Amino acid sequence: MYFLHYIFSIVAVSTLVNRVLILTDYKKRYTLLTMSTIRKKPVPALKISHLTKLYDEKHGIKDIDLTVNQGEIFGFLGPNGAGKSTTINTILDLLRPDSGSIELLGLDHQKDAKKVHKYIGYLSGDMETDPTLTGAQYLSFVSHLHKNVDKKTITSLVKRLKADTSVKIKNLSRGNKQKIGLIAALMHDPDILILDEPTSGLDPLIQTEFNTILSERKSNGKTTFMSSHILSEIQETCDRIGFIRDGKLVHVGSLQTLLKNTPRKIEARLKNSRFAKQLTQLNGVANLQQIDGMVTFTFSGDINRLIHVFASQTIDSLTISEPDLEELFMGYYREENQRV
């Protein structure tokens, strides 16, 4: 029996294991493909393209491009009035853009609004609700809107955030009201959590627990997009950050890269006080001060190079402080002002 010398393909589809097997005989070369090798790249959690929303010539957001991946915690930074809330309200379709597009999990935020909202949890910067309801009544109301919310989840969040749900919302402190808002945003385990100044009013212990909740969500592939003007909270939780100033996205990058390029604070108590003068000759040293044998300065560059220089000296103490985002934040703003 003679066999065809042309392409012979057998395609077997198994619905049980959800795989595709393609066996091809072409010039005696065989190829095996499975779904894992042809699976499409996951869509971004959030994709913003050329987004513009202006109230007048000076206020609003202008030509913003941004992509946030699934499973990412993204920090959206900027001072009050920079355009953070406008961006968030436009993402949520509470404001209509003048131009540009927004997709959440591959869905258009306007055309597919009903589907999109099922996947989102949201906390506004200034939560407003019926002040006559208790926290428990409000959470019950929200849970019925979402449907299929596990009461155990609500109970767990209330316990973890130490929320008092027995008091009417109008009588709650700023921090306790914020806890109720966070529980409402988290209760249905949304794929995308959008938070506007989420830790406002929270004490440090509750902030730490909240950060743990965000980390748990991240490990489950959930996305968080949070705005803030408090840089320390962003530094502790976020994978990447974006700076917005005067409605324009100034920079987007990973924390590691941004912090690496920010000066470290150095404090050293030296036996040889004259060594401080030598330090001024070292590239990367700035803002050097010497008081009673204690030398303080900032250093940009390879920290190993600095340690090598110190190794030749007798040092009583040496402190190297990692850069914080406050310095980075102000640095970008100074650079922008110099360009204007």
Image (spheres, rainbow, N blue to C red):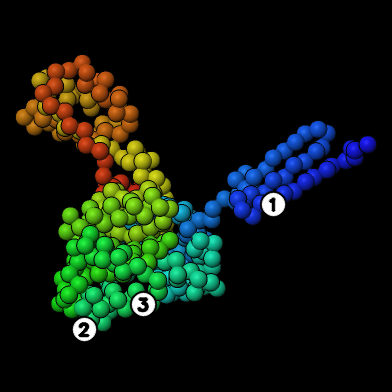
Residue 297 falls in which quadrant of the image? top left
Q: Could you tell me which residue is drawn at 28 percent across and 53 percent down?
A: 211
Q: Is residue 162 visible?
A: yes
- Asked which secondary structure carries label 3, the reply is helix
Q: Amino acid at mark 2?
A: Thr
Badge 1 or badge 2: first in the primary sequence: 1
Q: Residue at x 23, y 81 (%)?
A: 133
Q: On the image, numbered disc 3 is attached to which residue? A: 144
Between discs 3 and 1, the one toward the N terminus: 1
Q: Residues within 10 Å of mark 3 (few under 14, many from 20)?
A: few
CA gap, disc 1 to disc 2? 59 Å
Residue extending farthest to the top is 312
**Which is closer to the viewer, label 1 or label 2?**
1
Front position in the image: 300 or 176 = 176
Where 251 sits versus 53, above or below?
above
- The three-letter amino acid code for the residue at tag 1 is Val
The residue that label 2 is drawn on is: 132
Residue 5: assigned label: none
Labelled disc at residue 13 = 1
Place of residue 48 in the rendered image (x, y in percent of width and height, measured from the top left): 49, 61
Residue 255, placed above or below residue 55? above
Residue 301 x/y as whole percent: 33, 31
Foreground of the two, 163 or 85: 163
Note whether 78 is above or below 128 in the view shown. above
Real-space Cα separation, disc 2 to disc 3, in angstroms: 18 Å
Farthest residue, direction left? 292
* Callout 2 crowding tier (Cα within 10 Å): few <14, some 14–19, many ≥20: few
Residue drawn where x is 51% and y is 61% of the image? 105
